[in-house]
């Protein structure tokens, strides 16, 4: 019987971009149990809603996460629009879709870079981030911010993308897409990458479903669940199928994200072709009264916003269930039985966003 | 499965030159829409205070009696809400950033409207 | 309406039965959240199956104790720890009970605690 040790992992660790602490109970090189603890960056944003006007709160919602910022703002707006029964102009819905997909591309590229960094492939990491820069440039040219878009508001969007620019974006995405293809080829085919990721952190479809996981983690285990199929924004008019992989290991999660990048490029192309003209927002007056659970597929998975309003300018309750929060239990389960050397990879493959978790 | 999928990227990168900018020599050009910093045409301002009430971070202070408009640049999050709500459209978003500061107080920027002619002042008061 | 959302109200004693019904029908636990409404606390258990969103609602008094559903849905432990720490909901038998150490908060149950500067805030408005 070998001795049991507890190895503290985080909150400061080279592979962790954000603070989470794990107590890894190990026996030799194998993790027996992992106990997560969070709360290093809890900001209590949910409580802040009681002091802010519901229309101004979009800015706060956007700042819950620096990566899927636009989608946070969009989910919040959708929730309030649903309660107030606001018919958002079609063009605004398409613009939201384009920006949401751009965030997905840059988020996945960032994740691929971080994952490469976690398994020690520095040059691949830099390649991914160089490509991401191209996407960020598009975002900055259309919204004015690199990661905080500030473009969504209740009733529509704040900025328009004219048709000429839209065409340019689609063209640019074509060229960046080809470059991304050459880089992601390494993730899909390289021997050393596969050696580090294949068969690691396997989560079966049943387990993933039972643990309530969402997003790429769930889809990599063979469950076709993509919240974009709920038909919010313009997704009801676009053709796409959830990206599904069967293996359920770290490499499958990597493949799902790689394929989703190209799916997003395709979705932006479709949206650009179908984009109708017209207004980009409707004026919103009054205050919401009611409640709604708004769901959006973020790069990390399904996010749920619960908004409860009582007819005043301040909302009664605002609750965010971020995708990483739902994936934490799965991460704990995946870590059990893993080797210490694989722990960083497994943690990274759920694409942890701890600031999101703690809000 | 291949050992050489990265080689192509490496070869390309060898001949392409650096992807980074040689910074102080080569400056980045900001897009026209870039949100850099808030500026004000103070002469057009009517000191209604709408911008300061709307500001999500409370970075703006408007003193109507002293005809002053003040921004704490370190609190500003460049959302552009004030620009949007300004009834006189005297606020504008510049696409370059504000200069660096070494202490917090230096980031507070104050604009004061020049006192109008004595003839103007009572006329405004009557309204 | 982008989607239909059904809400089923129930009593404290029916919770475990209703949740296991959902579990046996193959629903995924989407989220659990808590709303403090003065003298009652409203808890929503949300489930999803093939994009159908269903919601179980429970209203309790702040001092009432409820059963943990983490014996049915293991992943509920994160939500339940969050509820007990931010709202002070008493939950019995959580599978992984952090006993107040899930979040590090300066005040106990910050989401229901009375605002210390409530008076000042209203004056400023």
Image (tube, rainbow, N blue to C red):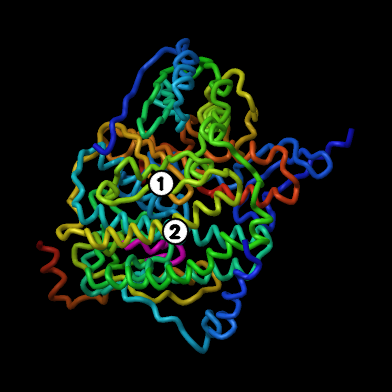
Provide residue C15's location: percent of width, then percent of height. 47, 15
Instruction: Please give the range of residues in magenta.
Output: B71-80
Which numbered dot is residue C47?
none
Q: Quadrant of the C terminus of chain C?
A: top left
Say few, some or many: other residues with alpha carbon within 10 Å of mark 1 (under 14 / 14 to 19 / 20 or more): some
Q: Are marks 1 and 2 in contact (CB under 8 Å)?
A: no
List the single residue furthest toward the top: C13
Can you say whether B11 is above or below A333 in the image? Answer: below
C17 lies left or right of C123: right
Few, some or many C-alpha atoms within 10 Å of disc 2 (few <14, some 14-19, many ≥20)? Answer: many
Residue C73: x, y in percent?
54, 25
Residue B46: image quadrant is: bottom left
**Which residue is found at the position 64% from the left and 36% from the top?**
A333
In this rendering, the answer to whether C66 lies above or below A213 is above
SS category of the residue bearing label 1 = loop
Q: Residue C65, relative to residue A201: is it above or below? A: above
Q: Farthest front residue?
A: B1
Mark 2, residue position: A261
Q: Which residue: 88% across, 36% down?
A: A2
Q: Which residue is mark 1?
A: A242
Q: Position of residue A268 (x, y in %)?
A: 32, 60
Q: Nearer the viewer, residue A15 or A54?
A: A15
The chain holding disc 2 is: A
């Amino acid at each position: 019987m070998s001795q049991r040790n507890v190895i503290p992992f985080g909150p400061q660790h080279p592979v962790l971009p954000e603070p989470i602490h794990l107590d890894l109970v190990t026996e030799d090189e194998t993790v027996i149990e992992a106990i997560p603890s969070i709360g290093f960056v809890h900001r209590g944003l949910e409580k802040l809603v009681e002091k802010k006007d519901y229309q101004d709160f979009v800015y706060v919602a956007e700042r819950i996460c620096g990566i899927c910022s636009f989608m946070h703002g969009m989910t919040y707006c959708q929730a309030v629009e649903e309660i107030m029964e606001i018919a958002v102009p079609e063009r605004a819905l398409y613009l939201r879709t384009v920006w949401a997909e751009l965030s997905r591309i840059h988020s996945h590229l960032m994740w691929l870079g971080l994952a490469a960094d976690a398994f020690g492939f520095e040059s691949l990491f830099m390649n991914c981030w160089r490509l991401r820069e191209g996407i960020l440039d598009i975002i900055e040219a259309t919204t004015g911010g690199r990661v905080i878009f500030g473009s969504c508001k209740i009733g529509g969007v704040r900025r328009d993308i004219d048709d000429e620019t839209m065409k340019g974006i689609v063209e640019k995405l074509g060229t960046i897409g080809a470059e991304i293809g050459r880089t992601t080829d390494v993730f899909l085919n390289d021997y050393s990458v596969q050696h580090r990721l294949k068969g690691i952190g396997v989560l079966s479809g049943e387990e993933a479903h039972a643990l309530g996981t969402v997003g790429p983690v769930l889809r990599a285990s063979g469950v076709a669940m993509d919240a974009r199929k709920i038909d919010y924004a313009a997704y009801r008019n676009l053709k796409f199928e959830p990206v599904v992989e069967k293996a359920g290991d770290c490499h499958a999660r990597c493949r799902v994200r790689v394929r989703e990048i190209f799916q997003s490029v395709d979705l932006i192309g479709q949206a650009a072709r179908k984009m109708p003209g017209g207004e980009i927002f409707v004026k919103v007056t009054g205050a919401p009264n009611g409640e709604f659970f708004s769901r959006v597929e973020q790069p990390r998975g399904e996010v749920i916003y619960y908004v409860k309003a009582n007819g005043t300018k301040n909302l009664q309750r605002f609750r965010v269930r971020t995708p990483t929060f739902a994936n934490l239990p799965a991460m704990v389960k995946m870590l059990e039985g893993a080797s210490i050397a694989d722990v960083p990879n497994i943690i990274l493959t759920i694409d942890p966003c701890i600031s999101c978790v703690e809000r | 499965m291949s050992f050489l999928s990265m080689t192509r990227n490496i070869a390309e990168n060898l001949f392409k030159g650096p992807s980074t900018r040689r910074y102080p020599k080569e400056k980045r050009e900001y897009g026209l829409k870039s949100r850099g910093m808030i500026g004000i045409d103070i002469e057009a301002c009517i000191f209604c205070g709408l911008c300061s009430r709307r500001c999500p971070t409370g970075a703006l202070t408007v003193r109507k009696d002293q005809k002053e408009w003040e921004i704490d640049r370190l609190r500003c999050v460049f959302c552009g809400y004030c620009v949007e709500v300004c009834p006189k459209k005297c606020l504008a978003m510049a696409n370059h950033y504000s200069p660096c500061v070494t202490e917090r107080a230096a980031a507070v920027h104050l604009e004061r409207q020049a006192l109008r002619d004595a003839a103007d002042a009572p006329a405004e008061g009557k309204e | 309406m982008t989607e239909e959302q059904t809400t089923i109200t129930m009593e404290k004693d029916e919770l475990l039965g209703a949740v296991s019904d959902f579990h046996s029908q193959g629903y995924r636990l989407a989220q659990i959240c808590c709303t403090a409404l003065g003298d009652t606390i409203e808890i929503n258990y949300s489930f999803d199956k093939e994009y159908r969103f269903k919601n179980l609602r429970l209203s309790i008094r702040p001092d009432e104790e409820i059963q943990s559903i983490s014996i049915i849905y293991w992943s509920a432990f994160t939500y339940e720890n969050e509820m007990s720490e931010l709202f002070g909901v008493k939950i019995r038998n959580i599978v992984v009970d952090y006993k107040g150490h899930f979040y590090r908060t300066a005040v106990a149950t910050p989401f229901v605690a009375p605002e210390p500067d409530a008076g000042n805030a209203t004056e400023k408005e």
